[in-house]
Image (tube, rainbow, N blue to C red):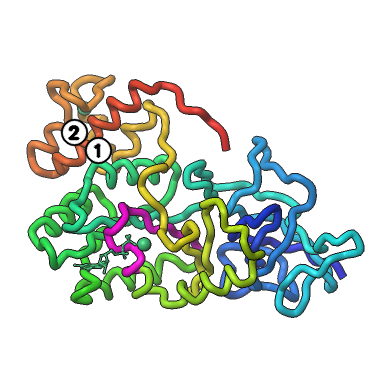
Amino acid sequence: MEYKTQCRILRGVGGLYFVNLASPDAHAELYPGTPSPLAGKCLLSRARGSLRTPDGGKIKVGDICEFIYTDNSFTEDGLPRDDSSGLPEGAVSAILQRRNSLIRPPLSNLDLLVIVCAAAAPAPATETIDKLLSVAEYHNIEAAVVIGKCELDPVRADKLEKTYRSALYPTFKLSCYESHGLEEFEKYIKSTLPGKVAAFAGASGVGKSTLINALFPEMKLEAGEISRKIARGKHTTRQAELFPLDIGGFLADTPGFSMIDFENFDFFPFDALPDTMREFRKHYGECRYLDCSHTKEEGCAVLDAIERGEIAESRHESYLSMYRTLKAKPRWEKRS
Ligand SMILES: Nc1nc2c(ncn2[C@@H]2O[C@H](COP(=O)(O)OP(=O)(O)O)[C@@H](O)[C@H]2O)c(=O)[nH]1
Ligand SMILES: [Mg+2]
Ligand SMILES: [Zn+2]
C-alpha cells in the first residue's frame, strides 16, 4: 500500500534527507496530514526528482514537504530499503508553501528566535541583538530575549530587561549557575515551542549550550543518535539541522552543537526597516512630518518617546546604524 503524508526536513545528507514524518498526535499542529503507519518517525529518505518551490527555491532544512512511501520502503529501524535500482523507495515528493525562508542560516519555516545575550562575559552588544530582532520581525518570526549570566552584573541585566520589555518582547533574565530565573523561561519556552521550530541565536560564549542542555537534556542524546544513523564521514559542511524535542517541536542548530551564530543572518531592504522596530510603530502616525525618518527630525514622535524614557536610547542607536547600513546598500539580492 502507498501512503501520502507530510514530513519536516531535519537535515540534508549528501542528496538524502533525514525527515520527521507527520504524527497525528505530537505534531498535530505542524502537520494536519493523513495518519500513516510510520507517523511521527524520523527516517532517512530521498527526494523524488529535483524538487523546487513555486519560486524556484531548492529544498531546505525546515521545509514541510509531501511524503510518499509504501509498506516496503523502510526497514524496522527506519532506514531506507533499497529498491532494485539501489535507491530508497520512500520519497519527499513536493515542497509545501513556506511561511518564511532564510538564506543564512539556510532554514525555512522558523517560528521562534530566542536571542541570548549575557549580562557580562561577553559584554552584551545591543546593536547585534537589535539587528536580529529586526531580522525576525521582517521574516515574521516570533522573538524572545534571554539575558543570561545575570549574577555577573545584575545592574546591567536589569537595564537590558527594561530595554527589551519596553521594546515589547518577551524578556527573561536568568543565571544557569545560580538557577535563577530559569523556571520562568522554562515555562515560557515549553508552552510556546510545541508544534514549532525554534532557534537559539547569540554570540559565542553567552551560554546558549548551557541553557539548552539545562532545558532539553534529550538534545545531547538526540544529536548522537542522528549522527550515528546518518552516513558516516559526510559532516564536511556546516549546515542547519533540526532536532525533534520531547515536547513536540524542533530546535535548529548547525553541526558541532554551536547553535545559530549572529554573524551571517539575512538582512532586509531599507524600506522595511521602520516596520521592524516594534515599539516605534505605534508612534509613526504622530510625527510632525509624514515622511519622517525618525532619525533627527523636529517633532518626531519616536524621538519624543525616547526623551520621555519610553523607548531605550540603545534601540534608537541601533536603528540609526541599520538605517545607515541599509541606505548605503539599497538593493538586497532576493532569492529563496
Ligand atoms: N557566570 C556564568 N557563566 C555561565 C553561565 N551559563 C554558562 N556559563 C559559562 O559560559 C561559558 C560559555 O557557555 P556556553 O553554553 O558554551 O556558551 P555558547 O557558546 O553560547 O553555547 C561556559 O564556560 C559556561 O560554563 C551563567 O549563568 N553564569
Ligand atoms: Mg554552544
Ligand atoms: Zn518620526
| The residue at label 2 has a CB less than 8 Å from ligand 3 | yes
Nearest the eye: 88 or 37: 88
Q: CA distance from mark 2 to mark 1?
A: 6 Å
**What SS does tag 1 mark?**
loop
Sequence-first tag of 2 and 1: 1
Q: Quadrant of the C terminus?
A: top right
Q: Is 68 located above or below residue 288 in the figure?
A: below
Residue 224 spot, x, y in % from top left: 53, 73
- Which mark, residue 291? none
Q: Quadrant of the N terminus?
A: bottom right
Task: Give the x, y percent position of residue 312.
Answer: 15, 43
Q: Can you say whether 269 is above or below 124 in the image? A: above
> Would you say residue 57 sits in the magenta stretch?
no
Front residue of 219/303: it is: 219
Question: Alpha-carbon neighbours of circle 2 within 10 Å: few (<14), some, or many (≥20)?
Answer: many
Q: Are marks 2 and 1 in contact (CB under 8 Å)?
A: yes
Residue beneath label 1, please? 280
Q: Which residues are magenta?
A: 196-211
Query: In the displayed image of the protein, which residue is found farthest to the front?
Result: 233
- Between residue 80 and residue 38, name the one nearer to us: 80
Question: In what element is the residue under mark 2?
Answer: helix
Residue type highlighted by circle 1: Phe
Q: Is residue 184 left or right of residue 195?
A: left
User: Which amino acid, mark 2?
Assistant: Val
- In the rendered structure, find residue 302 and report the number of the disc placed on it: 2
- Compared with residue 71, is residue 173 higher up or lower down, i.e. above or below? above
Where residue 221 appears, x then y in whole percent? Answer: 49, 76
